[in-house]
């Protein structure tokens, strides 16, 4: 990301504009790391984060509130559905394929949120100001001809994953990450120390952090999961815990 002080200055400018005008101001999409910095700042106006659906990773910051501004305002986020014209003959499309094709239109990554792929169809969350442009200009992803249309968020992101159970030695953050992603404890600890793990939107600083029911954990390069607490203790003294893993 850009220099931290420059990022903080940009966020402070948006907060000042919201405060002086008594109106809503919105940022572009922020990474988890940028969200963590923003939430650590002391600003004069309320700030909330929105990604287009509850479990989104990339989110925009909304400066203001209904009470502060005098009216409610939806975050300016749209969803563009990108589907092959002929699914039978389409390439197997990946996140990188959709992202690369959109960026090739001259669009900056900061105006794009999460990209969800379901049944070889891409759902791209973006700033509303750019949605029509994507819909008109994007005609091909990889070697596949596509059609674009504005859409609601797909059901796959509005319904939570099924609850599954895993066996761990403790409720420590590193223990649960290693069990879910089949890593060693030292590998999980390295991810945490390298600032690759976020706990409920905040940068995780300790491998020994104890997870609470409902905690959302994002592991860069691996995925996300929601911790749902202890189910029971095994006869060998280990814990069977419940998690919801986003695929």
Image (cartoon, rainbow, N blue to C red):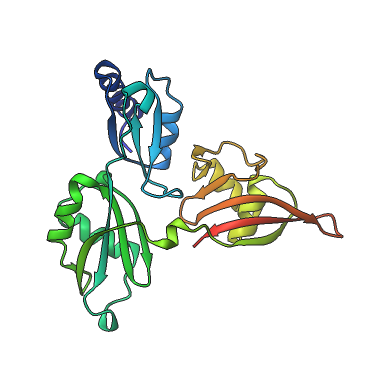
Q: In this view, does 81 lie to the left or right of 32?
A: left
Picture residue at 68% right of the left edge, 61% below the top: 165
The image shows residue 120, relative to residue 193, as above or below, that is below
Image coordinates of residue 198 in percent, x first then y, are: 51, 42
Picture residue at 24% right of the left edge, 19% below the top: 21
Which one is nearer the viewer's eye here, 67 or 145?
67
Q: Which residue lies furthest to the right in this view?
A: 235
Q: Is residue 172 left or right of residue 114?
A: right
The image shows residue 179, relative to residue 113, as above or below, that is below
Image coordinates of residue 75 in percent, x first then y, are: 31, 40
Which one is nearer the viewer's eye here, 52 or 177?
52
The image shows residue 69, relative to residue 181, as above or below, that is above
Q: Is residue 56 left or right of residue 244?
A: left
Which one is nearer the viewer's eye here, 164 or 41?
164
Q: Is residue 22 visible?
A: yes
Q: Which residue lies furthest to the bottom in this view?
A: 88
Picture residue at 44% right of the left edge, 62% below the top: 156
Image coordinates of residue 76 in percent, x first then y, are: 27, 42
Image coordinates of residue 10 in percent, x first then y, are: 28, 27
Instruction: Tell me the quadrant of the picture where the N terminus can be found.
Output: top left
Q: Can residue 183 be seen in this view?
A: no
Q: Which of the 4 image quarters holds residue 80?
A: bottom left
Q: Which of the 4 image quarters holds residue 71?
A: top left
Q: In this view, does 153 lie to the left or right of 235?
A: left
User: What is the count of numbered marks?
Assistant: 0
The image shows residue 25, relative to residue 231, as above or below, that is above
């Amino acid at each position: 990301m850009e220099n931290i002080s420059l990022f903080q200055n940009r966020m402070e400018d948006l907060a000042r504009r919201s405060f002086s005008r008594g109106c809503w101001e919105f940022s572009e999409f922020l990474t988890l790391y940028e969200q963590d910095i923003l939430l650590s700042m002391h600003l004069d106006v309320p700030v909330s984060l929105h990604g287009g659906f509850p479990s989104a990773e990339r989110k925009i910051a909304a400066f203001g509130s209904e009470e502060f501004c005098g009216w409610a305002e939806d975050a300016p986020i749209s969803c563009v559905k990108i589907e092959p014209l002929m699914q039978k003959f389409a390439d197997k499309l990946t996140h990188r394929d959709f992202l690369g094709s959109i960026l090739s239109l001259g669009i900056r990554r900061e105006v794009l949120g999460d990209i969800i792929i379901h049944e070889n169809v891409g759902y791209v969350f973006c700033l509303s100001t750019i949605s029509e442009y994507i819909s008109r200009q994007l005609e091909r992803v990889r070697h596949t001809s596509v059609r674009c249309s504005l859409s609601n968020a797909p059901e796959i992101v509005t319904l939570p994953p099924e609850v599954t159970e895993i066996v761990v030695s403790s409720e420590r953050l590193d223990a649960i990450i290693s069990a879910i992603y089949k890593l060693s404890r030292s590998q999980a600890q390295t991810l945490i120390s390298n600032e690759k793990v976020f706990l409920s939107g905040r940068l995780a600083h300790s491998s020994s952090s104890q997870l609470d029911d409902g905690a959302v954990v994002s592991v860069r390069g691996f995925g996300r999961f929601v911790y749902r607490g202890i189910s029971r203790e095994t006869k060998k003294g280990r814990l069977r815990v419940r998690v919801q893993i986003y695929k």
